[in-house]
Image (cartoon, helix red, strand yellow):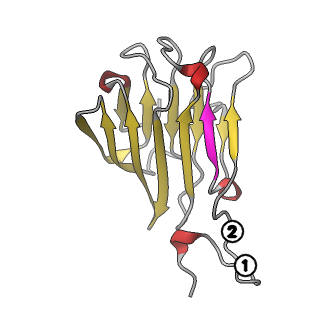
Amino acid sequence: MANPLYGQNKADGLIDNQVGGCFMVDPAGTDGSTGTPTKTLTAADSGNTYFINIAANTVYVELPAPADGLKFKFILHVLSDNEASKDFVLQTSADAVDIQGHIFEDQAALTEITADTSMVQWDTSDGAATVGDWIEVLAFDGHWYATGVANTAAAIDIADARA
């Protein structure tokens, strides 16, 4: 039986999305929103790492419905360093779908992402973004589990419902 945490086994025994690829999410002139995300991911995108550029526009990324083994990582690109007005928002596919876990903040604190959370936001008006801040999510048993790091503790907002 295949281990769902390592992707789906192909007929040839190789693992799909073992490493994934790196991609830039760099919106072209418009801010994303809950209703019109900048990037809507699918299960086929699993395993990828996304560099997020919020230098000029807010980036909303919507996760697909959770399926065992789906995994995504998001890192703030160098162009996002010290951004203090545009945000990065990671949201689930629906308010009823949760993200839970922890983000290590400000080199000293641990912020819990509690159950019933469907949106995690780098709210730069509360604290500037820092290059290299990241969040990674892994789906299992119908939920998203997250770990991450943010240099500025005030920048992270956790929401029970998508904006």
The one nearer the camera, 76 or 145, is 76
Amino acid at circle 1: Lys
Magenta includes 73? no
User: Which image quadrant: the N terminus?
Assistant: bottom right
The one nearer the camera, 75 or 32, is 75
Q: Write the residue at 51% across / 22% down.
A: 87
Amino acid at circle 2: Asp
Q: 52 above or below 112? A: above
The one nearer the camera, 156 or 162, is 156
Where is residue 117? Give x, y as percent.
37, 43
Where is residue 21? Give x, y as percent.
70, 50
Near mark 1 (Cα within 10 A), the count class, few <14, some 14-19 or many ≥20, is few
* Count of numbered circles on the image: 2
Write down the region rendered in magenta: 48-52
Q: Write the residue at 66% across / 73% down.
A: 15
Label 2 with label 1: CB-CB less than 8 Å: yes
Q: 42 above or below 121? A: below
Q: 56 above or below 111? A: above
Q: Write the residue at 53% across / 59% down.
A: 66
Tag 1, which secondary structure? loop
Name the residue that disc number 1 marks: 10
